[in-house]
Amino acid sequence: MTTTIADEAREATGRTPAASSRRPRRVSVGKIVAWTYLVLFLFVTVFPFYWILRTALSNNYALTRNPSSPVPVDFTLGPFKRVLGLATRAEAIAEGGSGASIDLALYVRNSLIYATTLTVIVVFCSLLAAYAFSRLRWRGRNLVFSIFLSALMIPGIMTLLPNFVLIHDLGLTNTFAGLILPGALFSAFNIFFLRQFMLGLSDDIEDAALIDGVGRFRLLFRITVPMTSGPITTISLLTFIGAWNDYFWPLMVASDSSVRPLTVALGVFQQASIQTQPDYAGLMAAALVAAFPMLVLFMVFGKRVVDSIGFTGIK
């Protein structure tokens, strides 16, 4: 009976299930436009990284003869050897490198000290402030928070000169303290980010803990912090990357190589050339080496960052 009904249905429609499944899908104009945009956006995003890699794998002398080549010109690992200190002065000059050298280990160490210390202090202070603005009840809380948010409207470049004058008067130039202190105690974005997440946390657990006699600091670090681990990881990563890539402030404060971070050292390396042109290949190799840790961090924690930002935005 079932077979007869199915046969009658196929005869009525004139199509079989196999024929229906083989029907080609229509590609809409919207999909074509969307995929075209995505491909172009991906190309514009990835191409600079490819061009940096191509330059870093080229002979610096050969680059001047064929600067528009899409592939490495006279392929060599010499730029990376120069940056890592594995090439002699004669080998560097033979490939078009400058006679200047860059102590990569020293400058990476300086950047790690600067970025790590700044991240720890600013995240800790932001955590305390966000908890006070979200979980504590006190008069004028919203007004003070609005004043804090107004700092987001002030461009960072406008605070460079006042901060430099302050650090200079305190005698903290060419010190890690001078690098770290101006931006370590306050971050309006971090406070706002953590506060928005904490506002969505349930009050029941905290109320029960307070009834049991748990103090505020223990409550913060034993209950609230574990529940806020995602946003804390996100702002820690973003703060670390921002400090690692910072250039203008270290350029003003850190002129001594003992505290100079890698970003400033790369700029000095570009200018310290005794040849007719800068060592572009070596500079691009150094830039790749400097960016590699950040790429690894973002590949590992990138999904968590996106999820935390999206979840915080709906609070």
Image (spheres, rainbow, N blue to C red):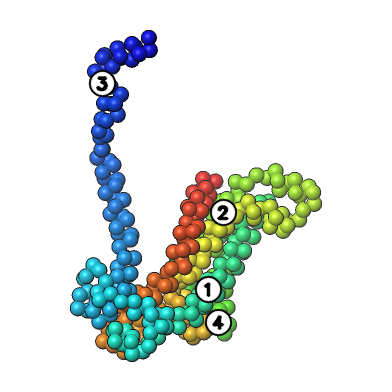
Q: Amino acid at mark 2?
A: Gly
Mark 2 nearby-residue class (10 Å; few <14, some 14–19, many ≥20): many
Left or right of residue 169, residue 277 in this image: left
User: Which residue corresponds to the image point at 26% horizontal and 43% vertical from the top-left?
Assistant: 32
As displayed, is residue 182 above or below residue 230? below
Q: Residue 289 appears at what percent x and percent y?
A: 42, 72
Q: Earlier along the polypeptide chain: callout 2 or callout 4?
A: 4
Q: Say if residue 74 shows up in the picture.
A: yes
The residue singled out by tag 4 in the image is 175
Eye-nearest disc, 2 or 4? 2
User: Which residue corresponds to the image point at 25% horizontal and 33% vertical from the top-left?
Assistant: 24
The residue singled out by tag 1 in the image is 112
Q: Residue 56 appears at what percent x and percent y?
A: 33, 74
Q: Amino acid at mark 1?
A: Leu
Give residue 15's mark: 3
Left or right of residue 248, residue 13 in this image: left
Q: Residue 115 appears at what percent x and percent y?
A: 53, 71
State the SS at label 3: loop
Q: Nearer the viewer, residue 77 or 254?
A: 77
User: Which residue corresponds to the image point at 31% horizontal and 73% vertical from the top-left?
Assistant: 57
Mark 3 nearby-residue class (10 Å; few <14, some 14–19, many ≥20): few
Q: Nearer the viewer, residue 91 or 110?
A: 91
Q: Amino acid at mark 3?
A: Arg
Image quarter for residue 232? bottom right
The residue singled out by tag 2 in the image is 230
Q: Earlier along the polypeptide chain: callout 4 or callout 3?
A: 3
